C-alpha cells in the first residue's frame, strides 16, 4: 500500500484533515503531537457508487491509501529528524497551508525540499571525487555526471521533478530518496466563504507546478457529521457536488501513478489498485499471484460503455465486450474478469 505523508505548519488544519480522512479523532491525534501517526483512507471513487447501483452486490470495496500525519513542520527542535526521515520514506508528500499565508508557506516548504536535496548532491559529489582519486571507475564517472546535472537544476531553485530522466537514470536516482523527485500535492485550507474561489490554488499550482486543491476543513467536518441522507442536500445548497476530501484523495492516488480497475458481480464490486502501464497479467496479480502465473486471457469492458449501455447484456449486443491477451495494458476504469490455469 502506498504511503502519503501529511505535513504543515502549526494550525494549518492538517490534523483535522487527517482525522476526516482516517476516522481517527483529533483528541486521539493530539495525545501524541510529537509522533508520526498512521491511518488508512478509502479512495472514494464515484464510479464504485454507480457500479453498486447496477449490480447491488452483497459487498463493496474501495481502493485504499495509507496516510501518515507528521508533527508540525519546524526546522528546529526534536521532531526535525523524525520529519525528514519520514519524508525520505514517503511515496508522496501532502503539504497543508492556511489560506492567508498559503503562497509564502508553500514557497518556503518547496525551498526546504530543494535545500535538502542540494546538501545531498553536494555530499555525494564529494564522496565520488574521493573514490575516483583512489580508483577511477567509469560507472562512478557516469554517476557524477548525473548528480552534477541534478545540482545544476537545484542551484536554480527548481525541483528535480521538472527534469526529464531516462528510465535507468530515474531508477538510480530513486535510491537517493530526493525530496523534489517525489510526488507532491498541496492543500489550501480556506474559510467556508472561499470554497468556490479557486484562484489561490490555481495561482500556487501555476507557480510551483504541483497539483493544488482548495478546501475548508471546517466545512468538510460539517459534511462528515451529517447523516448520510442529509449530505447531498446540504452540499447542493452550497453548490458543491461532493466532499473536497474525495477529490483530494483521488489527486493523491493519481499523482502516485496509480489507476483503478474493477471487478463486478452480485457478490462484490471492488476497486483494485495497479500502476499505470501495467499489463493484464500484472494487474491480475494484485488479486492473486496465480492469475499472473497461469494467465490465459482477460474479459474486459469499459466503465463508461457500461453506463451508456445500462447493462452487460446490452454491451454484448453492441459488441463492446472484449477478450484481451497478456500484452494488453490495463486502463483506468476497465472492468475485468480473468481466465487463468495453474
Image (tube, rainbow, N blue to C red):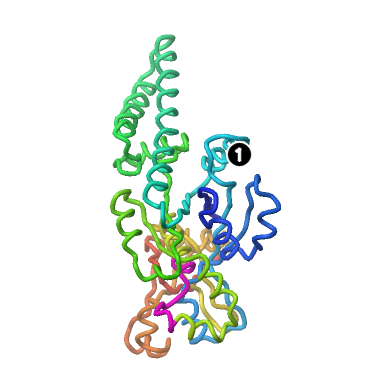
Quadrant of image for the C terminus? bottom right
Which residues are drawn in magenta? 236-247
Q: Is residue 253 above or below residue 312?
A: above
Q: Is residue 46 above or below residue 146?
A: below
Q: Is residue 195 above or below residue 54?
A: above
Residue 282: x %, y % from top left: 47, 58
Residue 273: x %, y % from top left: 49, 62
Q: How many marks?
A: 1
Quarter where residue 122 is shown: top left
| 341 sits left or right of 276 in the view | right
Disc 1 secondary structure class? helix
* Of 293 and 108, the residue lying toward us: 108
Q: Residue at x 47, y 72 (%)?
A: 243
Residue 228: x %, y % from top left: 57, 82
Q: Residue at x 54, y 73 (%)?
A: 270
Can you identify the residue that label 1 sits on? 79
How many neighbours does mark 1 have within 10 angstroms: few (below 14), some (14-19), or many (20 or more)? some
Quarter where residue 16 is shown: bottom right
Task: Inspect the magenta stretch and tell me whether residue 245 lies in it.
Answer: yes
* Of 128 and 232, the residue lying toward us: 232
Quadrant of image for the N terminus? bottom right
Quarter where residue 143 is shown: top left
Amino acid at each position: 500500500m502506498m504511503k502519503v505523508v501529511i505535513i504543515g505548519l502549526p494550525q494549518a488544519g492538517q490534523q483535522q484533515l487527517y482525522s476526516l480522512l482516517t476516522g481517527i479523532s483529533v483528541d486521539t491525534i493530539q495525545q501524541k503531537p510529537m509522533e508520526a501517526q498512521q491511518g488508512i483512507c478509502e479512495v472514494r471513487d464515484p464510479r464504485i457508487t454507480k457500479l453498486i447501483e447496477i449490480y447491488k452486490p452483497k459487498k463493496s470495496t474501495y481502493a485504499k491509501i495509507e496516510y501518515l500525519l507528521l508533527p508540525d513542520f519546524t526546522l528546529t527542535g526534536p521532531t526535525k529528524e523524525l520529519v525528514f526521515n519520514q519524508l525520505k520514506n514517503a511515496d508522496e508528500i501532502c503539504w497543508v497551508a492556511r489560506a492567508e499565508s498559503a503562497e509564502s508557506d508553500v514557497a518556503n516548504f518547496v525551498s526546504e525540499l530543494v535545500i535538502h536535496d542540494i546538501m545531498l548532491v553536494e555530499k555525494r559529489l564529494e564522496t565520488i571525487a574521493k573514490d575516483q582519486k583512489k580508483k577511477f571507475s567509469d560507472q562512478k564517472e557516469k554517476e557524477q555526471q548525473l548528480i552534477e546535472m541534478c545540482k545544476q537544476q537545484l542551484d536554480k531553485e527548481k525541483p528535480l521533478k521538472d527534469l526529464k530522466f531516462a528510465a535507468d537514470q530515474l531508477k538510480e536516482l530513486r535510491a537517493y530518496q530526493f525530496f523534489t523527485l517525489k510526488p507532491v500535492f498541496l492543500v489550501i485550507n480556506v474559510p467556508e466563504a472561499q470554497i468556490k474561489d479557486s484562484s489561490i490554488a490555481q495561482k500556487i499550482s501555476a507557480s510551483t507546478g504541483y497539483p493544488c486543491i482548495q478546501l475548508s476543513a471546517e466545512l468538510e467536518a460539517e459534511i462528515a457529521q451529517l447523516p448520510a441522507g442529509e449530505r447531498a442536500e446540504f452540499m447542493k445548497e452550497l453548490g458543491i457536488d461532493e466532499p473536497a476530501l474525495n477529490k483530494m484523495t483521488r489527486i493523491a492516488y493519481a499523482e502516485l501513478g496509480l489507476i483503478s480497475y474493477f471487478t463486478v458481480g452480485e457478490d462484490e464490486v471492488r476497486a483494485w489498485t495497479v500502476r499505470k502501464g501495467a499489463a493484464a497479467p500484472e494487474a491480475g496479480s494484485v488479486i492473486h499471484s496465480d492469475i499472473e502465473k497461469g494467465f490465459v486471457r482477460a474479459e474486459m469492458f469499459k466503465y463508461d460503455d457500461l453506463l451508456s449501455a445500462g447493462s452487460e447484456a446490452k454491451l454484448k449486443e453492441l459488441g463492446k465486450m472484449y477478450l484481451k491477451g497478456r500484452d494488453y495494458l490495463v486502463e483506468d476504469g476497465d472492468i475485468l474478469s480473468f481466465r487463468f490455469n495453474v
